[in-house]
Amino acid sequence: MSNMSNATIHEEGLLVTNDVVSKLPADVNPQYYPHEIRRAHPELGPIFYIDNWPYIAPILVVASPSTAFQATQEHSLPKFPALAHYMRGIAGTDDLVTMEGQMWKTWRGIFNPGFSGSHLTSLMPEFVQEATIFGGILQEHAEKGKMFPLKDVTDNLTIDIIGKIVLNTNFNAQKKYVPMVAALRRQVPWLSFGTELNLWQRWHPLRPLMYWYNQRVMNKYVTKEVDARFAQQKSQIDSSKSITDLALKSYLQPDSKDSPKSIDPTYKTLLTGQIKLFLFSGHDTTSASICYLFHLLSQHPSALALLRAEHDSLFTPDLSAAPTLLPESPHLINQLPYTLAVIKESLRLFPVASSTRQGQPDFSIRADDGSLYPTAGCLIWSIPQAIQRDPAFWPSPDAFLPERWLVAPGDPLYPVKGAWRPFEFGPRNCIGQELALLEMKVVLVMTVRRFDVKSVYEEWDQVKGVKGCRTVGGERAYQMKSGGPRNECINGEQAG
């Protein structure tokens, strides 16, 4: 590589990575690795290479707002190819996460209206209905007085919400077994980037069979729903505002005299793939984020009290008022500044995703000190986990301080521009961010005054016989390789 006189390169990437990983829980998500490497080797700074040859391309970690900006906003580099390999197990075709060029622009344009904040707010009755069922399930657990895995419950909540919003279908997974949902979740442990260090995991002989079987179940369900939605759109007897319906309305071109009589097979395959993608990514990440919210609020009673007070002020202390007021006046959900501050601070401490880009032969990233880091042949990894806990950008970076999001510019706590990026920035930002924020707001409004939640790790570990390291950076809650949080074991009771 050229122009690297000022660049920091870690020549013994595998040794460094293995040393850091050996001190972490075995089930921790790899997105923690760069931040923990920086903790162990602070001399690396906010941008550095990790060479894990021969298992994967060299990694260029970018862990500052300015370096992440260059890769995702100023230049919007293409997604790293291994991500398409991973997503193919869900979408089964080209997907919106890894599409490039005009194809991406076309499909992003098709779905943008359905994911807009104003459109999603108009669907408030669906959010409230599912959150009400969720509250009833928590009530059942509270009456039993026993610990239970919260992530299982929030998974079912968010898949039911995303099913209605995207496909106008009622999975009712909160109440029953759903083959489509089961197939989606069975597929997740088999997903592969094709770069895993464990070669057995990378080339597992059963993966093709599992991919085929689970895809078959998912495709059967989704294509049937798409056909039904198309028929209803053609007959103009349905006023549904689901994201799929909006996509089909666009396809039918209602103002044109040449409206198609059937769905083009290529369009249908791509549409089906994006629906599966939304169902997958739109429920797991939000489910994990809801768990982290409950976990943090259980640890910070003063923040919980302020949150409850805000809800009482807007919806009255009568807990039965919010489920009625929100569908009638959905704009109320945007009048909760402290609630939004709590959510943003939780997402700062526990971002559930990161961004990988493909380096280019003629592109280098410039560090704050002016050093150039060539990107040719590299996986560029933008790590919110590292940026959002860096004391250079965040005073008391590991502290839960919702007031960061309420102070005026000039205050020491006021967030640095570009340092909060759980949904990433730029044209390839997360299309579902408004949906995720809305879900979290509604869930908090509907439950946080009704229940007290307590994390019970020690009891869970004793029952399950869990041993070994169980913390990351001193924190018992952390993201797991499976995508879910490690704060799933809780006790629930009614708030007194």
Image (cartoon, rainbow, N blue to C red):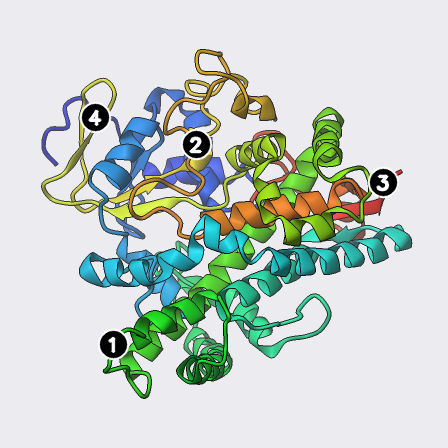
Q: Quadrant of the N terminus?
A: top left
From the top left corner, tell me how far across and down residue 295 is, in percent. 69, 39
Q: Amino acid at mark 1?
A: Ser
Q: CA distance from mark 2 to mark 4?
A: 25 Å
Q: From the image, state whether disc 3 or disc 1 is nearer to you.
A: 1
Residue visible at 14% across and 23% down in the picture: 5
Q: CA distance from mark 3 to mark 4?
A: 55 Å
* Mark 2 in CB contact with mark 3 (< 8 angstroms): no
Viewer-side residue, 46 vs 97: 97
Determine the residue located farthest toward the bottom in the rendered image.
261
Going from N to C along the chain, the mark reached first, 3 or 4, is 4
Q: From the image, state whether disc 1 or disc 4 is nearer to you.
A: 1
Asked whether the viewer can see residue 481, the reply is: no
Q: Amino acid at mark 2?
A: Trp
* Mark 3 in CB contact with mark 1 (< 8 angstroms): no
Going from N to C along the chain, the mark reached first, 2 or 4, is 4
Viewer-side residue, 419 vs 36: 419
Crowd tier of the residue under label 3, counting other residues whose Cα lies within 10 Å: few below 14, some 14–19, many 20 or above? few
Q: Is residue 74 above or below residue 38?
A: below
Q: From the image, state whether disc 2 or disc 3 is nearer to you.
A: 3
Task: State the mark number for residue 7.
Answer: 4
Q: Amino acid at mark 3?
A: Ala
* Mark 1 in CB contact with mark 4 (< 8 angstroms): no
* Mark 2 in CB contact with mark 4 (< 8 angstroms): no
Going from N to C along the chain, the mark reached first, 2 or 1, is 1
Q: Which residue is mark 2?
A: 420
Instruction: Assign a secondary structure to mark 3.
Output: loop
Task: State the mark number for residue 256.
Answer: 1
From the top left corner, tell me how far across and down residue 216 is, in percent. 46, 82
